[in-house]
Image: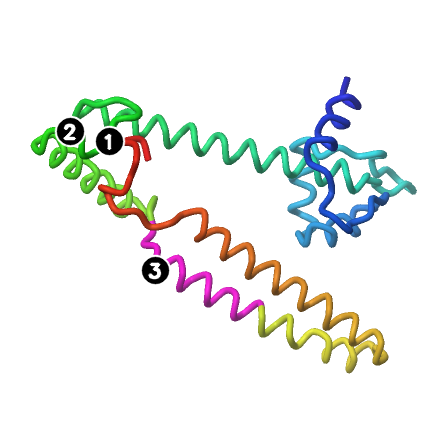
Amino acid sequence: MIELEIAEMVARFPLPAGVPDAVLNKSELADFFAVSLPTLDAWIKAGLPALSEGTNGRSWEFQASAAWAWKCARDEGDRLKTTEAQAAIEAMRLALVGGKAGDSIRALAPKDRQQLYDVEATFEKLKRERNQSLDRDEVSVVMTDLLRIVRDSISMLPDTLERTLGLDGKGVDMAVEHCDDILSELERAVAKFFGDRPIMTREARADLFN
């Protein structure tokens, strides 16, 4: 049964194009996902599938395709929970002023529309006071600062490896290429984060639930 579930996950979430499947040990899988070993341990406790569990004299073994599919399914579940929670919040806010899913904000009477705006403003104010909501520009500044730190540290890594480990020219070139790939992936992730959250005016929203 478990094998069938894993097979279904792998079919639904295949490895990215060009990434070969392989059997990886614990350290290799951490590098595969670019996460720390403690994070990987937490994933294992959460159900990350393993080919063999680590014991005395025996290392952990994971199938890359199964581990990737499990993480993708887990991420999708987290996004679904967030979406469901947001829908519940929006439904409660709508209940205060009337309206139903599919209604346009412009369809509300001016008094009801203003009441909705007031509820939204109060709701957002409370979220900010509880540190449950961050200004978009603040998030952008923090992400930019973090990426700058990561970029500077990663950019120095090939030279550090060359000096401390005697890495040859080919090794340095490979390290530079790998570091560039990491930075590009980080930039794509940040761009996607903001791209998935476009700024919308109230009247531009097609639905009261958006």
Q: Which mark is residue 137?
A: 3
Q: Position of residue 68 (x, y in %)?
A: 71, 40
- Name the side, left or right, on which 1 lies relative to 77: right
Q: Describe the colour scheme in one phrase.
A: rainbow
CB under 8 Å between discs 1 and 2? yes
Residue to which mark 2 is pinned: 108
How busy is the neighbourhood of tag 1: few (under 14 within 10 Å), some, or many (20 plus)? Answer: some
Question: For residue 146: magenta?
Answer: yes
- Name the side, left or right, on which 112 lies relative to 42: left
Q: Quadrant of residue 2?
A: top right
Residue to which mark 1 is pinned: 104
Q: Position of residue 178 (x, y in %)?
A: 73, 66
Question: For residue 87: magenta?
Answer: no
The one of 5 and 149 positioned closer to us in this rendering: 5
Q: Position of residue 114 (x, y in %)?
A: 11, 36
Mark 3 residue type: Asp
User: Residue at image x 65%, y 62%?
Assistant: 182
Dot 2 lies on which element? loop
Mark 2 residue type: Leu
- Name the side, left or right, on which 86 lies relative to 145: left
Q: Quadrant of residue 119?
A: top left
CA distance for labels 1 and 2 = 7 Å
Task: Please give the range of residues in magenta.
Answer: 134-150
User: Residue at image x 49%, y 31%?
Assistant: 80
Of the two numbered discs 1 and 3 on the same chain, state the one appearing first in sequence.
Answer: 1
Mark 3 or 2: the one toward you? 2
Q: Which quarter of the rendered picture does the C terminus lie within?
A: top left
How busy is the neighbourhood of tag 2: few (under 14 within 10 Å), some, or many (20 plus)? Answer: some
- Name the side, left or right, on which 31 lies relative to 112: right
Residue 113 position (above or below residue 145): above
- Residue closest to the far left: 111
